[in-house]
Structures are given as C-alpha cells and as structure tokens.
Image (cartoon, helix red, strand yellow):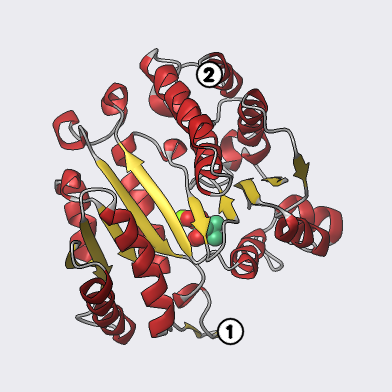
Amino acid sequence: MIAVLPGDGIGPEVIAEAVRVLDAVGITDLREAKFGGCAIDATGAPLPDQTLALCKEADAILLGAVGGPNWDKPPRPEAGLLTLRKELGVYANLRPVAAHRRLAHASTLRPEVVEGVDLIIVRELTGGIYFGNKASTADSAFDTCAYTEHEVARLVRIGAALAQRRRKRLCSVDKANVLETSRLWRRVAEKVVDEEFPDVLLTHQLVDSCAMQLIRDPRAFDVIVTENMFGDILSDEAAMIAGSIGMLPSASLGDGARGLYEPIHGSAPDIAGKGIANPLGTILSAAMMLRLSLRMHAEADAIEGAVSAAVERGVLTRDLGGTASCREVGDAVVGGL
Ligand code: IPM
Ligand code: MG
C-alpha cells in the first residue's frame, strides 16, 4: 500500500497526475491522507496521528508539497514535514539532477554548460541545523547544528554506494574551514570511503566553492554528499541546470525499503489551482518510488521513458517555456507508457 499525501498549493494537482501514471502501470492500492496546511485546517496539526500511522503502515509514501501563506505561524506545515521525515527515519535524501537535451533552452545557463549533466545530490535529511536545539526571544535567536559520527557515516555510505554504480566520484561538501560539524563530516567521509569503498574517488569541497562550481562546470559532478541545510540550498541551485525546479524528483530513504518520495519544489501558492504546475518532478518521484521501494524496475523505466518522450515532443508546462497544462503533461506521459 502506498500512502498518498497531496498536501497544499499545487500539491494536489501534481499528485493527481502522478496517481494517474501509477494507475496506468497497475498500482492501485493507494490511500490518501491529510498532511500539511490542509491538515492544520482540518485537525489543528500538520501531521495528524492517523496520517503518521498510515505512513508507517505503507510500503512507500508519495507526497506533493506543503505550506502556504495561510499557515505562517506555528503550527507550521513545514514542521509536520520535518517530523514525518524524522519519524520515518529517512535520513538520506536523493536528489538526481539531469539535463534533458530538449530543455537546454529553459536553463538560465548556456546549453554547452548544462548539456549531459547527470549528478545526484545525497542530502542528509534528519539531522543538522534543522533538528538541533533552537530558541528565540524577542530580540535574539539561535539554531544549533550537531552531527554524530553515526549520522555522517550512514549517509556517506549511501552516497559512496551510489557512486560505485555510477562514475565512482564522490564529492563531500562541507564548511570545514569554519564549522566543527564539517570537520567531523570530513573525517568520517575519509574513513568510510577509505575502509569500505576503495574504488570510489573521494574529494572534498567547501560549500561556497561548490555552489560556484555547480554553475561553472556541473558536468564535473557525479555524486555529492552533504549535510541537511547545504543540500537544501545546493539542490534548488542545481534545479536550474535541469531547466526548472518543477523537474526534480527526490527519494528519502532510511535503512529499510520504505521511502518517502516528493518533488523538490514547494507548494507554489501563486500558481495553485490554475492547472499550470509542472507534474514531472512528482511523476519522476513516483518512478523512483517504484524502483527503490517496490523494486518494480520495468515500470520505473517505462515511466521515465514516457517522461523523456513527452519532453522530447515538447509537451511542456510554462516553467519550461511551453503552454501545456498540468493535465496535458500527465496525459502525454500516460499516453507514452
Ligand atoms: C525541501 C524543502 C523543505 C526543506 C521545507 C519545505 C521544510 O525546502 O524539501 O527542500 O527545507 O527541507
Ligand atoms: Mg528546499
């Protein structure tokens, strides 16, 4: 069973298209639940107990997006998302970035810079500054960043194992010239790769320099491993290589097969309800779900192939310079299966 959490803003629109695609490949055991701002409105909490229970029972969770201007004071929808990630123990967030030939024009970077990019950011998702002690008074505030060796090692292992099956290059991103947590990160990355992945080439890069290199020469990257907040920032930046943040899927994994799958974009309240959102990030997240949690490789390949074919034919939403609606893009993918 798959738990489906449409969420807020454009979440329900993009999820509807992903559900149609899943249906077309024979996945029909889906159960929907309220999550995010709509759950706050209905129950007072962004992650109601029933929603969390359903997610824990599920083989995988497909999520749209949460948040919006209606919920800018606690309890916030985003807090529900962080609790869900933590409760599910999905500490590794895989964010692949690929440049489709047909979308080179949609990127703000020159076509020759983005052509052929195929990288993946492995973002730590349940630790770091997102989860450290925090507090605020009227005129001061603090957030703390903390990591343990265990948290870093398990994340680096996932990144190194991925690199092993790809071009064998792992770039660990930190701010070791300033932060203690980054010095720990670097030490642990060295140790794990040295002892367990001798065939992987590990390099280290400071996050500010990485942000620059991602734009200067994105093809130089294979797998990036980094802490929670750096990964959040770098993946939005990297989205422009793919032409639009609406294209990027993600998979969040823990130690078991269960995973949480969501596009990296937000709820985009400015375009919600207009039928113009790009559903491809969510559809590609559903493909990752089939491959990584349900081991349905053929179906995952078929969906990714149908997405590429739709893009190739120029069935594109506005963010990519096209005129197709969210529904029309979903139709094109379903039709291409
Ligand atoms: C993301 C989002 C979230 C995050 C927000 C909505 C809490 O930006 O998934 O990248 O910062 O992790
Ligand atoms: Mg983000």
- Answer with mark 1 or mark 2, whichever residue precedes in sequence: 1
Are dots 1 and 2 in contact, CB under 8 Å? no
Q: Which residue is mark 1?
A: 138
Ligand 1 lies under 8 Å from the Cβ of mark 1:
no
Provide residue 276's location: percent of width, then percent of height.
56, 25
Provide residue 200's location: percent of width, then percent of height.
20, 61
Foreground residue, 318 or 177?
Answer: 177
Three-letter residue code for mark 2: Leu
Few, some or many residues within 10 Å of mark 2 (<14, 14–19, 20+): some
* Residue 234 as seen in the image, left or right of residue 270: left
Three-letter residue code for mark 1: Ala
Ligand 1 lies under 8 Å from the Cβ of mark 2:
no
State the image quarter where residue 138 is shown.
bottom right
State the image quarter where residue 187 is shown.
bottom left
Q: Nearer the viewer, mark 1 or mark 2?
A: 2
Q: Which residue is pictured at 29% across the width and 80% down the height?
A: 188
State the image quarter where residue 195 is shown.
bottom left
Q: Which residue is mark 2?
A: 337
Foreground residue, 117 or 323?
Answer: 117
Extreme-right residue of the structure: 43
Label 2: which secondary element:
loop
- Inspect this view and state whether residue 68 appears: no
* Alpha carbon distance from label 1 to label 2: 56 Å
Foreground residue, 113 or 22?
Answer: 22
Label 1: which secondary element:
loop
Q: Which residue is pictured at 51% across the width and 56% down the height?
A: 252
Tally of marks: 2
Up the image or down, 262 lies above or below 190; here it is above
Q: Which residue is pictured at 45% across the width and 25% down the height?
A: 307
